[in-house]
Amino acid sequence: MVGDAAFPLKLYLMRPYPGQNLTHQKRIFNYRLSRARMVVENAFGILSSRWRVLHRRINLHPQNVDTLVLAACILHNFLLAPRENVRMLEEAEQQRRNLPAVRHMGGNRASRERPVM
């Protein structure tokens, strides 16, 4: 994960080197880390402006949050070029029409069930 100096130092977090008198390599690292963080923040800003669910705390298991963000990215990319996606949607509709019809399906209502004795 990428963070700035405000985040605590953790094994899973990359943050810039502190201080003013840094070597050339450390300055380059800080610059590249800052650019990476800005790209991520900008991308999340674009996503959150389209999907309001990302404006507040998401009460889901972390694995499901990953799925939610991935779905938001996929939908975002899908909506960027709707004309290009029309062909794909038409092909999917054609495949759906070729499926055999389902016959004689009744509802699964409890009132139709016979009691077991």
Image (cartoon, rainbow, N blue to C red):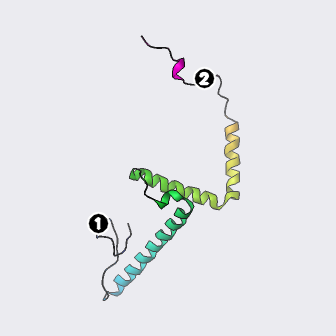
Residue at image mark 1: 11
Could you say which is closer to the camera, residue 110 or residue 19? 110
| Quadrant of image for the C terminus | top left
Q: Up-down: is 43 above or below 98?
A: below
Location of residue 97 in the rendering, given as x and y in whole percent from the top left corner: 70, 37
Q: Is residue 1 left or right of residue 53?
A: left
Residue 37 placement: quadrant: bottom left
Q: Is residue 80 left or right of residue 73?
A: right
Look at the numbered disc 2 and give the secondary structure of its residue. Answer: loop
Q: Is residue 69 left or right of residue 89?
A: left
Location of residue 110 in the rendering, given as x and y in whole percent from the top left corner: 51, 22
The residues bearing labels 1 and 2 have C-alpha atoms spaced at a distance of 57 Å
Residue 28 placement: quadrant: bottom left
Look at the numbered disc 1 and give the secondary structure of its residue. Answer: loop
Q: Which residues are magenta?
A: 104-117
Mark identifier at residue 106: 2
Give the residue displayed 47% in from the left and 69% down from the top.
40
Residue 46 placement: quadrant: bottom right
